[in-house]
Image: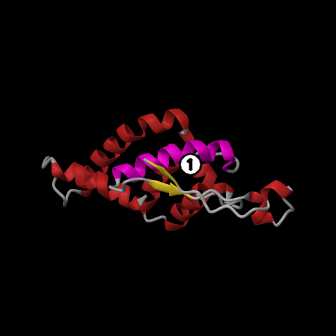
Amino acid sequence: MDSWFFSLEQDVLADGSVDASDSAELMTRTDTLMEAQLTNISKTAPAFSAVLRTYRRALAEGDNMLAEGLISWLAGQPNIAASVKRAASIKGELDHFGAANFLIGLLTILRDSGFPGLYLVPFSHSRVKKTPSPPEQKKKHPARVMPLS
């Protein structure tokens, strides 16, 4: 996330209309650029966008506890303080539907940060939970890597 914010700031500074020492103007212009980038993400994952906005504000205000709580919520941690969720106007936990939509946002951020894509390595849930699997699935299959970009 921080790499993405840094990339946005560099894009703002690159046009030469903002002085790097004017932190208030740099923050305002970077927020404007961030909102433009989040427009498409907000349509499918509004909570992801809300968390990013609040995370950026928390970092700017030096509220590291809030920033860490927000990143924990994005990572799917189950026990997040209600005050953290309230600060970003989010409710509940991140479920599998939200996670799928967040993947779109994450790919956008990775692309804008200069990363070429993301590799996902699916795993068998039954193997993780050590539950018995049907005999036809007992053969060990190599992990399949799926590039996303």
Instruction: Tell me if 129 is positioned left or right of 44 in this view.
Output: right
Vertical position of residue 9 compared to residue 29: above or below: below
Q: What secondary structure is the magenta-colored segment mainly?
A: helix
Which kind of residue does numbered mark 1 sit on?
A: Ala
**Residue 4: percent from the left, percent from the top?**
37, 55
What residue is shown with label 1? 88
Depth check: give the residue in front, 64 or 99: 99
Q: Is residue 53 visible?
A: no
The quarter of the picture where the N terminus appears is: bottom left
**Residue 112: percent from the left, percent from the top?**
34, 49
The quarter of the displayed image where residue 113 is located: bottom left
Query: Going 51% across and 61% down the picture, which residue do you hit?
Result: 67
Q: Tag 1: Cα neighbours inside 10 Å, few (<14), some, or many (≥20)?
A: some
Query: Going 63% across and 44% down the picture, which residue do you hit?
Result: 98
Q: Which residues are magenta?
A: 94-112
In the image, residue 30 lies in the stretch drawn in magenta: no
Helix, strand or loop at mark 1: loop
The residue lying furthest to the top in this view is 43
Query: Going 79% across and 60% down the picture, which residue do you hit?
Result: 126
**Residue 141: percent from the left, percent from the top?**
67, 61
In the image, residue 105 lies in the stretch drawn in magenta: yes
Depth check: give the residue in front, 136 or 57: 136
Query: Going 56% across and 57% down the picture, which residue do you hit?
Result: 70
Instruction: Tell me if 38 is positioned left or right of 125 in this view.
Output: left
Q: Is residue 147 visible?
A: yes
